Image (cartoon, rainbow, N blue to C red):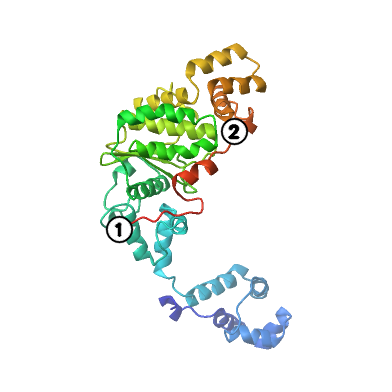
Amino acid sequence: MTTASATWIKHPGFYIREEMEARGWLQRDLAFILGVQEQAINQILSGRRGISPDMAQQLGAAFDVPPEFFANLQLAYDMAQSKQPDPAVAMRGTLQSVFPVREMIRRGWIEQSDPILLESQLATFFEVKAANEIPYLAHAARKSRYEDREIPAAQLAWLFRVRQVAGSVASRLYSEKALRAALSNLESLMVSLDATREVPRILMECGVRFVAVEKLPSAEIDGVCFWLRDSPVIGLSLRRDKIDNFWFVLRHEIEHVLRGDGRKEEMLDVLEGESSSATNDSLPPEERAANAAAEDFCVPKERMESFMLRKHPFYYEKDVLAFSRLANRHPGIVVGQMQRRMNRYDYLVRHQAKVRQFLLPGAIADGWGRTIPVSN
């Protein structure tokens, strides 16, 4: 289907003929002027051939007008003859500009369908009744509480996937006492990469739903803590696949659970730089408390400070490895804490071991090539 204006926008050949008649030129005259075969002129005048940029230049010189005049005539004609875009294109563009819909489809979070059904699926995904209540979409009837908190749309999509996956997991009754007691069990795992596979089981036995969901490409997020009724949920993205980061983020979220944080609204955490400092006064008290607990859990603060004070300013690798053995920690955890304190992230990087491959086999994990089936 062409545009309505196609009925009056004519082929450039019509206007060229008018110019020729005004000058009393025949086809063979214009062909002579342009130095082309008369048949080429006939094809343009009859509308069987368009005007190329080179021909526009030639015609401009022949008629002593800017070549853009003829180029624009051709463009206007081509646009008039073109098909109207499928309305679905604009709708898909709107959806994709807000949420990473294509990636959500690829991950199996929603299904490929026409835009109306996509909106319906997104409404279900974000736990609202209708499309006009989907957060961040331009036609939303009102701002959601997530927009008021300025949570980026991609982070929000990740959060709701964590909610979906966690909601599909059966859980024991949560016990704060059991979780506090489990901290010593978790600490005993910190010397070995392979032992991290036990983390999900230990947390589940305490009534904490632990899930790992791969982050979306534009969602910089490390972890989240929230509650499904009386059941706490810890979600990790594992976006930085390093053993020190894993234990820091995990202990940070555990502290949120122990404090009862996240009952009213989710505690979304991006833990890097100043946001992972226990001394940053600009952070909310619950975040500073969680950072302090995580830092001390990775390597007890007094022991870490004592070691660095004694060895300052020369931190030899052999000394770091010896301290790691004494602290019963994987060297990558000690190195990570030292990097943070020195703000030197190039220090002993070969000890920054990857943990994801050891953790995922024992975890409820969505992403990294796998999709957890959930019921809406």
Left or right: where does residue 285 sit relative to residue 276?
A: left
User: Secondary structure under badge 1?
Assistant: helix
> Which of labels 2 and 1 is toward the front?
2
In the foreground, 327 or 344: 327
Sequence-first disc among 2 and 1? 1
Whole-percent x, y for residue 259 in the image: 32, 28
User: Secondary structure under badge 2?
Assistant: loop
Dot 2 crowding, Cα within 10 Å, few <14, some 14–19, many 20+: many
Name the image quarter holding residue 284: top left
Whole-percent x, y for residue 264 in the image: 27, 37
Residue at image position (36%, 48%) is 160
Residue at image position (53%, 24%) is 328
Dot 1 crowding, Cα within 10 Å, few <14, some 14–19, many 20+: many
Query: Badge 2 is on which residue?
Result: 352
Query: Badge 1 is on which residue?
Result: 131
Left or right: where does residue 280 sit relative to residue 304?
A: left
Is 202 located above or below residue 105 in the figure?
above
Whole-percent x, y for residue 324 in the image: 57, 23
> As shown in the figure, which amino acid type bears the numbered disc 2?
Gln
